[in-house]
Image (spheres, helix red, strand yellow):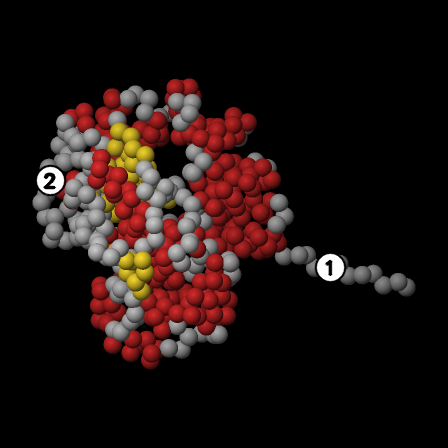
Amino acid sequence: MTLRLGILGLALALFSGCAASRALCPAEGGRPWREVRSAHFRVRTNLEEKAATQSAVELEEFRRALLLAWGPDFDPPGSVNVVLLSNPRDLEEFTGGQYAGFVRQDADGPLMVMTGDGGYLLPDAPGDKETQAHELAHYLSAFALPRQPRWLSEGLASYLQTVTIKPSTRDVVLGRASLPLLAYVRSHGWLTLDELWQWDGKTQQSTAELQRHYASAWLWVHYLINEHGERFGVLQDRLSRGEEPRRAFAAAFQGELQYQEAITNYVRLGRYAITTQPLPTVPTQTQTRLLEPADVHVIRGLLFTGAPGDTSRAERQRKLDLELDQALKEDPLHVEAQQMRSGKMEKPEQLKLARLLVEKHPEDGRAWDMLAAVLDAQGDLSDQQEQARKRAAELLPDSANAHNNLAWYYARTLQPQKGLASALRAVRLMPGNAFILDTQAALFFQTGRCTEAVAMERRALDMLHERAPDEARQELKRRLTEFETKCVPAPAAPTAKSG
């Protein structure tokens, strides 16, 4: 996240509901909200319709520009959720004026929150586009590189976050230096590659340590691409085939790098190349629908809980509750609002509500997913949960989370053969999600595919997001150790000698 200090200094009084918000809900006199779906984005916005559809197309261009890092023909599947507020003032209520945009990780990938100024024009718009580019680069790079050591993952995302599209020529410019990161390494120095390789195992790092690692990772990736581009390409080719990262690096660079003097000169002189390529054609077809007032209150609730800043957890919860109260006044059976609220209910009430939502919204996969989750929380692993999981996956074909939940159900009930297809679908949709990879590994292990289980669990550890809790990292390490231990063939019994 990038602080935007001194730009939005206006403090806003915060009131309950959305009546005091600059991003008003339609029932209270605000602009209409709409959802625009393009080939790879779902955009919810209070922009006017023309600007909203234009924004979705420009996000497609943004995505395509980043994908040029892996060639003009690379086009992975999947869709990204975006909340696009019409101007920076709309965001102040949620961030206190400290941030121009942010990204949070949801079950189905990143939720990108950004602002326009009547329209979203990537080269010129206000707002923190580097944050969006960085997180989108993480998401996209996972399709290209299924194995990534942490220094490469963060360094590559930082390298790509400076992408721009020239308004006049529609050319894409990749590889510009990040001025803040360059200033950091010039002032504070940088870590060696040997030190960066050890980043994967580090937990509980201070802000200063993280800053040093991020800046160093960016520097090494920027340096290797510019000074050893062919070898860096070989490294990416090997990682794209799932090769173990250190082995892939050793093969690409023929051993450890000893370039300290060269990289020192690189930092001091600041000479590097940028690439300029034509922006390929992007899909321009969009579908638009108006959102209901209850939908807007749910979006506002997500913004209150997900926005960065110093607001306490209790205060965030209070604001979320107010938004959900209003959403359910507008629509008592709003599926997403009820999903977010159901955690406060007693288990019998949760189950009753989930069954009612399925009855009233039988074509909404989220209702079936909620029913499955409630059954699971009550320890019900019967056919009822299986059917709910299957229906959710059918109705949400592009939801990696729905497919992963179905696969994990089969892993827990020791029916691995039934779960493999769903697990594979989830991995294809989100190859960078460590927990989805972990599910695939568990199913491989249960079917006796030990080598694949160990490789997939190692890949899961590689892809664990930097903001993942330490408990999750330790759990994946524990599972990897279990797979490695149990997959080692037992020594052959000695052959008895005949007398």
Q: Which residue is mark 1?
A: 492
How many tags in the picture?
2
Residue 347 spot, x, y in % from top left: 41, 25
Is residue 205 positioned above or below 261 on the image?
above
Q: Nearer the viewer, mark 1 or mark 2?
A: 2
Q: Could you give the CA–CA distance between mark 1 and mark 2, rounded to whole angstroms?
A: 73 Å
Which residue is rendered at x = 42% and y = 45% of the image? 77
SS of the residue under disc 1: loop
Which residue is rendered at x = 52% and y = 30% of the image? 386
Which residue is rendered at x = 45% and y = 65% of the image? 235
Q: Could one spot residue 450 in this view of the protein?
A: yes
Residue 329 spot, x, y in % from top left: 25, 21
Q: Which residue is mark 2?
A: 12
Residue 461 spot, x, y in % from top left: 46, 54
Q: What's the amino acid at mark 2?
A: Leu
Say few, some or many: other residues with alpha carbon within 10 Å of mark 1 (under 14 / 14 to 19 / 20 or more): few
Of residues 30 and 445, the one nearer the viewer is 30
Q: What's the amino acid at mark 1?
A: Ala
Could you tell whether 222 is left or right of 370 in the image? Answer: left
Mark nearer the N terminus (1 vs 2):
2
Which residue is rendered at x = 33% and y = 78% of the image? 262
